[in-house]
């Protein structure tokens, strides 16, 4: 795969920021969009915008085909058994909240346990905190090893027969760690718990097979995988989804409505109350086509190589702290770091003056920041359009940052 | 943007306050205390103030954050010490105007070191860093006024 050619397909990357060519290293926050995705949205709104599942008219049929066609693309993308297992929603946060509010509230009681880890994103912490408060269940954390990875022995110690739900991120948005989801799911199932996976940082970057992972739920967001904002996916095993109550009620999700009682549509629509995110789903479908064309394996390989190159080059800078495992083979395409005493916001501002976009802050993972004993960090994250040249510019920018602040101090 | 533009943000006086913060610490128990953080970036400040006869007799801060948030906190404590609540709140309004790039009326308010923070207005992503300590001061003084 040729990242330089791929880059040409992303119009936004062809611009100057603060007088320098843009170097976009914040794809873990949100990815940029290829022209195919932008055009799919344009085409939908210009040619076949209509509400779905109701009209007899031609545009309504075309919009429904587009929307449901996108669902089939998602099903194939993660190798789910059926389209009934694919629920469209606003994104990872909504997806995890749906599982917590529906499955969690119905199945948890005092004495039960929910197990998550110290590296989770806030979206995989707070929904469980809330459902624990509501049901009297206990929230437990899997401790991390010194290099920031999860050991299966620790998982075995933490998950007990009282555990009903285990919810872990597939790839850490801070440490870049790839977690052994399949093995964790096995431990969860041995103890009679279900396995929920936060796939926000994995679905865009590696091949996911929900049947192979044997997870019960998987949540991910479209906007981190070249798709539009506002669209995401909850995958759930049919047997579980069938028994779950919807969390949003209203139009689109009903079968029969009486004055005092109503019944729900079948899967997956009973979880899609209100006019669905039609354009978003169509855009996500276009993003999946785009990613498939390049190949998830190629994307993953490319990002591994970039991460290895970045860790190598960045480690040469004096005063550089890189978080997470040093072995690039164990991690995805992002590097979280701190540079001497320069606060990450100041690092990000100086880099921005050079046209380089990185993230600075706590990355929506305050418990992990506490574990790392850092109040904030900076993060460079890579995607299929990034090149070694981008990393060279980052490294040059970091050297300048260091020099700049050594002058003022 | 060249590094010269950055110099408008990171003026020497700002870096001096960052490196040698004034009024760093915590006042004795019973002082007016405000804890505030910036949830989007993790900056946090604890501001303690002693108000006597409508005047800020003393102010100290503790916290963690970037050069802009911490130097702004240092300058703020320096600027409000000895002022009346009314003056301090007025100063806060002027500071807010400066951050928004608005024209402001100095009248007889001596801005002192605070003027150095003017450059922050050109870095919208950093305005919240600069205003954190000021918001804490405002909240504390308004609570104090309410209890009077």
Image (tube, grey):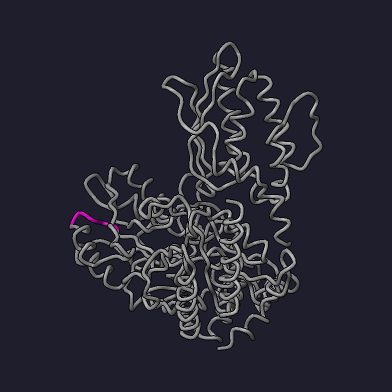
A80 displayed left or right of A113: right
Percent x, y of residue A342 = 53, 54
Q: Which residue is drawn at 57% across and 47% down?
A: B67
- Quadrant of the drawing holding the C terminus of chain B: top right
Q: Is residue B15 depicted above or below A394 in this figure?
A: above
Q: Which residue is drawn at 50% across and 41% down?
A: B44
Q: Is residue A401 depicted above or below B76 in this figure?
A: below
In-front residue for pair A311/A178: A311
| Image quadrant where residue B17 sits | top right
The answer to whether any part of residue A266 appears in the image is no
A280 displayed left or right of A97: right
Q: Residue at x 45, y 50 (%)?
A: A375
In-front residue for pair A360/A109: A360
Q: Which residue is drawn at 50% across and 22% down?
A: B32
Count the numbered circles shown.
0
In this picture, which residue range is highlighted in magenta?
A161-165
Q: Per the image, is B60 magenta?
A: no
Q: Per the image, is A162 magenta?
A: yes
B53 displayed left or right of A296: right
Percent x, y of residue B146 = 57, 17
**What predominant SS class does the magenta segment belong to?**
strand
Q: Is residue A96 depicted above or below A224 in this figure?
A: above
The answer to whether any part of residue A239 appears in the image is yes
Percent x, y of residue A245 = 40, 55
| Image quadrant where residue A330 sits | bottom left
């Amino acid at each position: 795969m040729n990242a330089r050619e791929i880059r040409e397909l992303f119009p936004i990357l062809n611009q100057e920021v603060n007088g320098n060519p843009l170097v976009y290293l914040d794809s873990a926050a949100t990815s940029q969009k290829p022209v195919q995705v932008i055009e799919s949205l344009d085409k939908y709104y210009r040619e076949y915008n209509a509400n779905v599942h109701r009209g007899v008219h031609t545009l309504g049929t075309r919009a429904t085909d587009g929307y449901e066609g996108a669902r089939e693309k998602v099903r194939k993308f993660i190798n789910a058994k059926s389209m009934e297992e694919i629920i469209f929603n606003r994104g990872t946060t909504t997806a995890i909240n749906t599982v917590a509010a529906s499955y969690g509230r119905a199945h948890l009681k005092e004495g039960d346990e929910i197990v998550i880890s110290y590296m989770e994103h806030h979206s995989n912490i707070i929904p469980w905190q809330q459902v624990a408060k509501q049901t009297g269940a206990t929230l437990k954390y899997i401790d991390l090893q010194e290099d920031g990875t999860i050991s299966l022995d620790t998982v075995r110690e933490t998950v007990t027969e009282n555990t009903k739900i285990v919810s872990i991120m597939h790839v850490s948005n801070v440490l870049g760690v790839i977690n052994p989801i399949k093995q964790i799911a096995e431990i969860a199932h041995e103890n009679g718990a279900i396995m929920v996976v936060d796939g926000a940082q994995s679905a865009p970057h590696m091949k996911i097979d929900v049947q192979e992972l044997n997870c019960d739920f998987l949540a991910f967001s479209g906007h981190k995988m070249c798709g539009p904002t506002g669209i995401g996916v909850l995958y759930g095993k049919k047997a579980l989804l069938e028994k779950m109550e919807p969390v949003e009620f209203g139009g689109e999700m009903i079968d029969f409505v009486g004055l005092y009682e109503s019944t729900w549509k079948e899967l997956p629509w009973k979880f899609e109350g209100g006019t669905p995110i039609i354009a978003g789903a169509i855009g996500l479908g276009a993003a999946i086509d785009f990613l498939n064309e390049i190949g998830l394996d190629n994307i993953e390989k490319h990002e591994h190589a970039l991460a290895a190159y970045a860790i190598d080059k960045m480690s040469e800078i004096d005063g550089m702290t890189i978080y997470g495992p040093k072995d690039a083979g164990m991690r995805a395409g992002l590097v979280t770091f701190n540079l001497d005493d320069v606060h990450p916001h100041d690092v990000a501002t100086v880099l921005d003056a050079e046209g380089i976009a990185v993230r600075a802050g706590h990355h929506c993972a305050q418990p992990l920041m506490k574990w790392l004993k850092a109040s904030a960090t900076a993060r460079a994250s890579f995607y299929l359009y990034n090149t070694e040249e981008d990393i060279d510019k980052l490294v040059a920018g970091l050297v300048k940052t260091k020099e700049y602040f050594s002058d003022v101090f | 943007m060249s590094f010269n533009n950055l110099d408008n943000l990171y003026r020497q006086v700002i870096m001096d306050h960052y490196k040698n913060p004034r009024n760093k610490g915590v006042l004795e128990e019973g002082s007016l205390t405000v804890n505030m953080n910036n949830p989007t970036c993790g900056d946090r400040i604890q501001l303690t103030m002693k108000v006597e006869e409508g005047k800020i007799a003393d102010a100290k801060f503790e916290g963690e954050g970037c050069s802009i948030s911490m130097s702004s906190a240092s300058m703020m404590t320096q600027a409000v010490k000895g002022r009346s609540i009314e003056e301090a709140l007025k100063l806060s309004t002027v500071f807010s105007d400066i951050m928004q790039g608005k024209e402001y009326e100095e009248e007889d308010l001596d801005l002192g070191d605070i003027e150095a923070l003017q450059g922050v207005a050109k870095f919208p992503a950093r305005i919240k860093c600069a205003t954190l300590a000021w918001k804490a001061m405002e909240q504390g003084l308004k609570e104090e006024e309410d209890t009077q």
